[in-house]
Amino acid sequence: MIQTRDTDWLAEHGLELCKTYPGKWIAVHDRRVIAAGDTLAEAGEQALKLRPQRDFILEQINVEVDLPHVD
């Protein structure tokens, strides 16, 4: 299932995504970022233009939560 693969891809690429899209909303489809924006609506609108089937995941990149911390 694509969404499961995309969820796994998000987890595997968390550090890279935190560096590239800190604080942004991203849309992921088929293990790649297809849209990004400052708000959920902005990222969602961009993604819908590319994937009107709505078969993408929207995720906010929260650096404080998603970035691994070294103690």
Image (cartoon, helix red, strand yellow):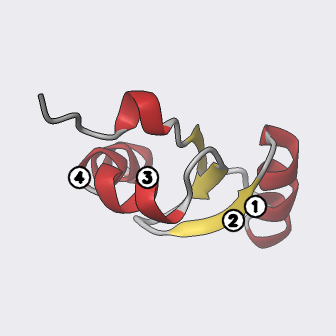
Name the spot of residue 70 as percent of width and height, x first. 14, 35
Local SS, label 4 = helix
- Which badge, 2 or 1, is on the more N-terminal residue? 2
- Which badge, 3 or 2, is on the more N-terminal residue? 3
From the viewer's perspective, is the residue at label 3 or at label 2 nearer?
3
Is residue 55 visible to us here?
Answer: no
Q: Amino acid at mark 2?
A: Ala
Instruction: Report the disc number at residue 12.
Output: 4
Q: CA distance from mark 1 to mark 3?
A: 19 Å
Q: Amino acid at mark 4?
A: Glu
**Residue furthest front as drawn:** 71
Q: Amino acid at mark 3?
A: Cys
Q: CA distance from mark 4 to mark 3?
A: 12 Å
Q: Which residue is mark 3?
A: 18
How many numbered marks appear?
A: 4
Q: Which residue is mark 2?
A: 35
- Which badge, 4 or 1, is on the more N-terminal residue? 4
Give left or right: position of 1 versus 49.
Answer: left
Marks 2 and 1 in Cβ contact (< 8 Å) = yes
- Which badge, 4 or 3, is on the more N-terminal residue? 4
- Which badge, 4 or 2, is on the more N-terminal residue? 4
Local SS, label 3 = helix
Q: Mark 3, residues whose alpha carbon is within 10 Å: few (<14), some, or many (≥20)? A: many
Q: CA distance from mark 4 to mark 2?
A: 19 Å
Please name the residue shown 46% across and 39% down the image. Answer: 63
Q: Which residue is mark 1?
A: 47
